[in-house]
């Protein structure tokens, strides 16, 4: 159990029972730091010492909560890479119903270009794509330090154990079989807190 002895923001639960995911722990810590910052003067970077007297531990290096800023949710973004316009549209409608902005790409190359220009909270990736296939796109995502932590959900009509192993070896975080079950899709969004 993680416990905060100081009073926190009314929306922060000071008690979290196991299992405590790293994402939940970081959100809790971010909120606690944000609460502490709101109590202290905004221009106080050092703890009462002059710049020359400050040690490394005196510097206030806040973690910024990317999920909220003073209670307002941030814009969540998803990328859907699939050569089927029907699948892209279906996922777009489902994600937008959850207030998630969606970009879509028809090819792996287009998807990689979008990833270079934008930040995404989650990527839905078809295996069978024209040009670069989904496995290779996934490998490229996981090799890139700025994208490595982004969850990649493989979407495919191939459901053999071999295909799942191949997806795991490519670095995908979750593997969903088309047609995608609505409950499984919602569980993925909850799992990655998108």
Image (cartoon, rainbow, N blue to C red):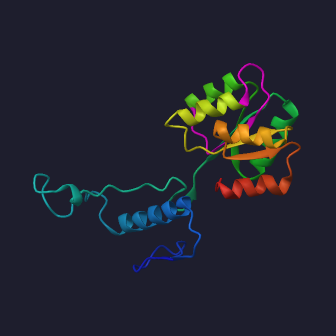
Q: Position of 61 compared to 2: left or right? A: left
Residue 137 position by quadrant: top right
Q: Position of 184 compared to 112: left or right? A: right
Whole-percent x and y of residue 170? Answer: 65, 36
Residue 104 position by quadrant: top right
Bounds of the magenta segment: 118-134
Question: Would you place residue 93 above or below residue 56 in this image?
Answer: above
Whole-percent x and y of residue 93? Answer: 81, 44
Residue 35 position by quadrant: bottom left
Q: What's the residue at 85%, 30% (across, down)? A: 84
Give the main secondary structure, helix, strand or loop, of the magenta stretch.
Answer: loop
- The answer to which of 46 and 29 lies nearer the viewer is 29
Whole-percent x and y of residue 127? Answer: 77, 32
Q: For residue 27: magenta?
A: no
Q: For residue 124: magenta?
A: yes
Whole-percent x and y of residue 58? Answer: 22, 60
- Looking at the image, the residue that sits furthest to the front is 162
Q: What's the residue at 51%, 52% (across, down)? A: 66
| Residue 62 in view of the camera | yes
- The answer to which of 170 and 79 lies nearer the viewer is 170
Q: Position of 79 compared to 3: left or right? A: right
């Amino acid at each position: 159990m993680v416990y905060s002895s100081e009073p926190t923001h009314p929306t922060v639960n000071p008690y979290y029972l196991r299992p405590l995911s790293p994402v939940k722990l970081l959100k809790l810590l971010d909120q606690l730091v944000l609460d502490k910052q709101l109590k202290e003067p905004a221009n106080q970077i050092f703890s009462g010492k002059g710049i020359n007297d400050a040690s490394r531990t005196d510097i206030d290096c806040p973690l910024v909560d990317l999920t909220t800023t003073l209670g307002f949710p941030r814009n969540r973004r998803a990328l859907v890479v699939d050569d089927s316009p029907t699948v892209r549209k279906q996922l777009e409608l489902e994600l937008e119903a959850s207030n998630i902005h969606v970009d879509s790409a028809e090819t792996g190359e287009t998807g990689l270009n979008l990833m270079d220009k934008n930040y995404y909270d989650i990527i839905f990736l078809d295996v069978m794509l024209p040009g670069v296939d989904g496995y290779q796109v996934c490998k490229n995502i996981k090799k890139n330090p700025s994208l490595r932590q982004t969850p990649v959900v493989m979407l495919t009509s191939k459901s053999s154990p071999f295909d799942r192993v191949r997806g795991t070896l490519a670095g995908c975080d979750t593997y969903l079989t088309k047609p995608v079950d609505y409950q499984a899709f919602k569980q993925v969004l909850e799992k990655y807190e998108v």
